[in-house]
Structure formats: structure tokens, C-alpha cells
Image (cartoon, grey):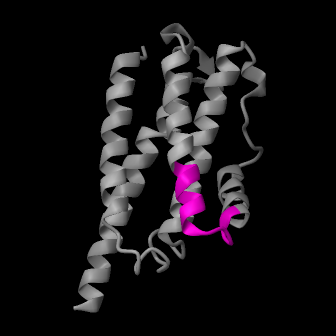
Amino acid sequence: MADKAEMHRELELAWSDLTAVVESVSEEDREKSGVVESWTLKDLLGHLAFWSGRAAETLRCVCAGRLDDVPFGEGDNWTDEWNEREYNVRKDRPFMEVRTEFLRNYKEANACLDETPEEKLNLKLRGEEVAVYFAGDTSGHYREHAAQIREWLRELETSEA
């Protein structure tokens, strides 16, 4: 069973950790590739902005009783396809524009969590609780990529030393 207060705590902790590591990246390093595969920090922030926005949209659909409208792709590779699509949407945008979207979509996801009744978080969606999808698109995702940024920064330090 989802515990909304615990979800908020996890979201805040993961967000604080992620933003701390993002802010530790120098302006010079922001456009260097390799954070995740060939992505730059900007590309990763765009990726996280998209998935945070999707988390907010999922909760809006669930609260409105429109479970069938929650966006999902088709086939085995839909997340990879969506990631590629969203990378292409943002690849030529300036860093600060993508960063602004990243911050805005986090706030939107957090606000949607505030507005979602706990019982709605426990509804089943494609065999999983809504809370599992929300955490996967937000706090779990933030933790995964914060660790990757840290590893990338360590690699940069050793390659530049």
C-alpha cells in the first residue's frame, strides 16, 4: 500500500540529492558528453523533465478517473523510443531552458502528488500500483541518474588528472 507521506519524503530526498549533484557540475562540463552514454548533463535534465512531466500527467489522469488515458507506448522498446524522441525535442535548446523545464516539471509532479488522494495511488494500472509508476518516473529515476552523474564526474576527474 502506498503511503503518500513516505512518497513525499522519498521524492524530496531524491530531488535534493539530484539537484545537489547537478549544481556541482561546472558550467564548462555541462555540455560534455558521457553522463549517460553520449548524453550531456543538459540531455539528461531534458530526459528527467520529460519523465517528471509524465508522472504528473499520470496522476492527473488517475485523479480524473481516466486510467485508460495514462500515456504508455507499445511494444518492448517504447521507453527507448520515447527517450530518443524526447532527446531530439530538446537537443538544440539552450541549457538554461532545459534546466527551467526540469525544475518546473518536478514542481508539477510534486504538486500533483499533493493533490492525489492516497487511495488513488493504490489503484492498479497495467498490473502495478499507480504509486510504483510515479516513483519510477520521479524519485527512483532521480536516484538512478544522480548516481550516474556522480560516476561521470569521477571519471572526468581521473581523465583530467
Task: Judge whether residue 2 is colored magenta.
Answer: no
Residue at 30% from the left image edge and 65% from the top image edge? 24
- On the picture, is 43 further left or further right than 85? left
Position of 29 relative to 93 (above/below): below
- Can you give x and y, in whole percent of width and height, for residue 73 in the image? 75, 43
Residue at 72% from the left image edge and 29% from the top image edge? 70
Residue at 56% from the left image edge and 25% from the top image edge? 112
Q: Which of these two is toward me, 22 or 63?
A: 22
Residue at 54% from the left image edge and 33% from the top image edge? 109
Residue span colored magenta:
90-102
Position of 103 relative to 38 (above/below): above
Q: Quadrant of the N terminus?
A: top left
- On the picture, is 10 further left or further right than 95? left
Position of 143 relative to 1 (above/below): below
Q: Which of these two is toward me, 26 or 134?
A: 26
Position of 3 relative to 112 (above/below): above
- Can you give x and y, in whole percent of width and height, for residue 89 in the image? 73, 62
- Can you give x and y, in whole percent of width and height, for residue 63 in the image? 65, 15
